[in-house]
Image (spheres, helix red, strand yellow):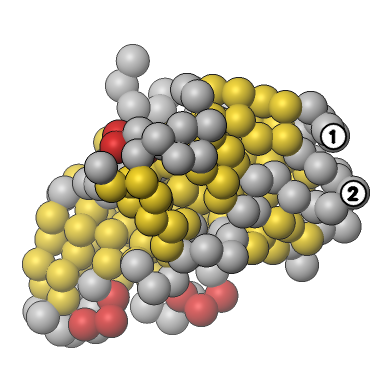
Amino acid sequence: GDSVTQTEGLVTLTEGLPVMLNCTYQTAYSTFLFWYVQHLNEAPKLLLKSSTDNKRTEHQGFHATLHKSSSSFHLQKSSAQLSDSALYYCALRRGSALGRLHFGAGTQLIVIP
Amino acid sequence: DAGVTQTPRHEVAEKGQTIILKCEPVSGHNDLFWYRQTKIQGLELLSYFRSKSLMEDGGAFKDRFKAEMLNSSFSTLKIQPTEPKDSAVYLCASRTGGNYAEQFFGPGTRLTVL
């Protein structure tokens, strides 16, 4: 079946350092990949999405590139800010009209001064 | 535009009670989802509706959890009977039907079962 793996449950970074949150996936179908971000006491919101192999997608300072050869969609940012502290979910959707999202376990990012 | 609305925002129940959570999706969205969110398990799918038809339900949740979509603009999640392990945040989400469609989440209902 379809699955998403986020290897880090918790990432703690000092402000200004680069961010990289890992996401790998398994599916036998064409795919759409998403990153959702959830700040404390808020609803998850879409951060990034992609379905194009090897194309970088960017939003709000974050970027990710879908690599189908390695089944990866890692989230990156060049310089962490305190406001980036949040829970980040990677999600996969099959390329079909009825596809629902398969979420990874989530990575809690804490940025410290 | 109104986003996804969920009521109540907080619910406290005694073990064994029946509780009903409510959700109003974004107007015009075809797909509606119910999730349970906990720190340990993350986001777990409870139910997925398309145009009011149940497309998928989380197998592990079938016995005490029942989601219904009474019309295209209203859904309920009933938990009967509640158990302390049901304490979690319950999220409702909706989207249009397109492959690339963004899923919009509601603010959630925080359920505490004593």
Q: Quadrant of the C terminus of chain B?
A: bottom left
> How far across and how far down the image is residue B32, in percent?
49, 43
Label 2 marks which chain's residue? Answer: A
Residue for point 65% across, 35% down: A64
Question: Mark 2 or 1 closer to N-term?
Answer: 1
Label 1 marks which chain's residue? Answer: A
- Residue A36, visible in the rendered structure: no
- Residue B64, visible in the rendered structure: yes
Residue for point 37% across, 78% down: B64
10 Å neighbourhood of mark 1: few (<14), some, or many (≥20)?
some
Q: Which residue is mark 2?
A: A69
B4 or A111: nearer the eye? A111
Give the amino acid at mark 2. Answer: Ser
Say what secondary structure mark 1 lies in: loop
The answer to whether B12 appears left or right of A43 in the picture is left
Image vertical order of residue B5 relative to residue A61, above or below: below
Q: Which residue is mark 1?
A: A53
